[in-house]
Structure formats: C-alpha cells, structure tokens
C-alpha cells in the first residue's frame, strides 16, 4: 500500500538532498562489475526524481560524483562519465515532460568536454521549467566549495570590494555554488553508511538526517515517501526549546 496518503502535503521539505550510495556493493552481490551497479542506479534516479516532483518537492539535490571520485580506477571513472553523458541525453526529454529544471553544482570544468557540453545543453533546454529543480552535484566536495568561496571573499576584501567587518553567514552563502538554493531540510543516505562524505557541510547545519540500508539501485518512490514521513514526525527546534517551538 502506498504511503502517499500518510504524507502531510502542508509540511513537505522544500529541499531534499540524497547521497546515492551502494551501487558498487549492489553489483558485487550479483557478481557483476561496479559499473553494472551504476547503470542500474539510473533507474533509482529516474523513479526518485519523478516521485519527488509528483509529491511537491521543489528542490532535489543528488550527489552524483565527488571530487574524491576522480581517484577511482580510470576504467570506472571513464565508464561513469560515459554513463553520465548518455543518461543526460536520454533523460532531458523526461525532464521537459515533467516540467523539471536541471542545475549542476561543483567543479564542472573538470568534467570531460563531451560531458560538460551535454550538461550545459540540458541545463539550457530546461531553464524555464518550474515544477521542481534537480541539482546534480558533479565533481563536487564541500571542502572544495568552501575553500573556493573563502578565496573569492579574500580577493574581494583585498580589492576593497568587500568590507571585512560586514562578513557574516549570509556573505558566505552568496559565494557557494549553492547560492540562491534553499538549504536542505532533509538529507537521505542509502546503503547503511552513516557519514556525510564531504557533502553540503555548510548547508546541512540544521538538516534532518535519514539513513536507510537500501542500496541505491533498490531505492524507489516508497522509500522516498518513508523518509519524508519520518522527517514529518520530528520536531525541528533550531536551537530553541520544545516549549518555545510549540508556543
């Protein structure tokens, strides 16, 4: 039975971020190469994106490839980049049909030229869509992102464009690759691992965490709904007492 009737549409997270983990282990369990897991993980991406849009989520961020992933075996990295290109090419039509806008965050210039070209074309084609924004974190790491932001701020202070005394949390927000994107209220990680893996460290300061043992290729819409229902059962205090929140 679907969990949809149990979801409070008035209390949906505006932004959900997902660490898609477990592709390699899923493939290994089946005696296949790791890329087989990544290929099947695309099905989970499609199901999750469409169901998030249907339920009313406005922002969905998927951790697709970290800066650390460049250190994986060259064969796997090349296969992942080829898979990314083909997936973007195939799924752009679906994004258009579902009125979903595509965006990307990360050190995108590190991507192969063919991959970056397909990505930019898909972003341009979907730029006017309004139902939901899908953010792909590609060649991304939070430490890289924060370091780049600090460098930009330091340069503008040096040039006299920014007053050191005025720098606050909001200032750093504006220099991150996520500038203009609301912070995630819910962070989901699959595969049973309980770590953040250098993902949106600044942005998830007050996110609710949800961990599931499901390996990413097995993650489906009902798993997303379970995470949302769990999120809705929590009291979000933001440093206040429970009594203050209820008041």
Image (spheres, rainbow, N blue to C red):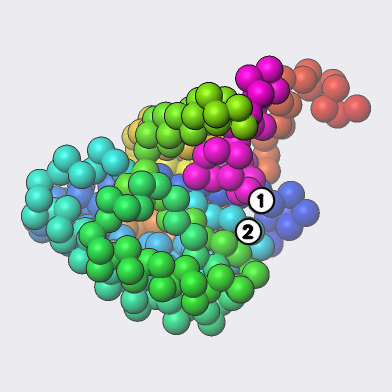
Distance in Å between CA atoms under marks 2 and 1: 6 Å
Q: Quadrant of residue 132?
A: bottom right
Q: Do the residues labelled 2 and 1 touch (CB within 8 Å)?
A: yes
Q: Mark 1 points at which residue?
A: 14
- Rendered-image quadrant of the C terminus: top right
Q: Residue 57 carries which label?
A: 2
| Residue 227 position (above or below residue 160) | below
- Which of the 4 image quarters holds residue 192? top left
Instruction: Assess disc 2: are there few (<14), some (14-19) or many (≥20) residues with their C-alpha within 10 Å of its C-alpha.
Output: some
Q: Residue shown at 43%/34% (left/top)? A: 148
- Which type of secondary structure does the marked residue at label 2 adopt? loop
Q: Extreme right residue here?
A: 247
Q: Nearer the viewer, residue 89 or 157?
A: 157
Q: Residue 89: x and y, percent?
A: 34, 76
Residue placed most toward the observer, 62 or 52: 62
Q: Position of residue 59 (x, y in %)?
A: 59, 55
SS of the residue under disc 1: loop
Of the residues under marks 2 and 1, which one precedes in the sequence?
Answer: 1
- What number is the disc on residue 30? none
The residue nearer to you, when weighing 141 against 162, is 162
Image quadrant where residue 237 sits: top right
> Is 58 displayed left or right of 92 in the figure?
right
Q: Nearer the viewer, residue 31 or 96?
A: 96
Task: Tell me what residue is drawn at x 53 percent, y 24 percent.
Answer: 158
Res 246 visible: yes
Start-end of magenta stretch = 162-186
Is 172 contained in the magenta span? yes
């Amino acid at each position: 039975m679907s969990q949809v009737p149990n979801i409070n549409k008035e209390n949906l997270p505006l932004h959900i971020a997902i660490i898609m983990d477990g592709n390699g282990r899923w493939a290994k369990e089946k005696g296949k190469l790791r890329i087989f897991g990544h290929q099947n993980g695309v099905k989970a991406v499609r199901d999750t994106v469409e169901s998030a849009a249907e339920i009313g989520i406005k922002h969905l961020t998927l951790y697709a490839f970290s800066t650390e992933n460049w250190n994986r075996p060259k064969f796997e990295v090349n296969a992942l980049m080829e898979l990314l290109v083909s997936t973007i090419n195939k799924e752009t039509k679906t994004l258009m049909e579902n009125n979903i806008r595509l965006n990307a965050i990360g050190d995108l210039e590190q991507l192969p030229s063919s991959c970056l070209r397909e990505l930019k074309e898909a972003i341009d084609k979907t730029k006017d869509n309004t139902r939901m924004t899908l953010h792909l974190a590609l060649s991304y790491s939070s430490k890289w992102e924060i370091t780049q932001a600090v460098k930009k701020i330091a340069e503008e202070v040096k040039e006299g464009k920014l007053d050191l005394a005025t720098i606050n949390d909001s200032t750093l927000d504006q220099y991150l690759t996520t500038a203009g994107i609301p912070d995630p209220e819910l962070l989901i990680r699959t595969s049973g691992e309980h770590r953040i893996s250098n993902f949106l460290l600044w942005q998830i300061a007050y996110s609710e965490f949800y961990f599931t043992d499901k390996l990413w290729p097995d993650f489906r819409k009902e798993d997303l709904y379970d995470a949302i229902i769990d999120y809705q059962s929590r009291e979000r205090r933001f440093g206040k007492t429970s009594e203050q929140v209820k008041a």
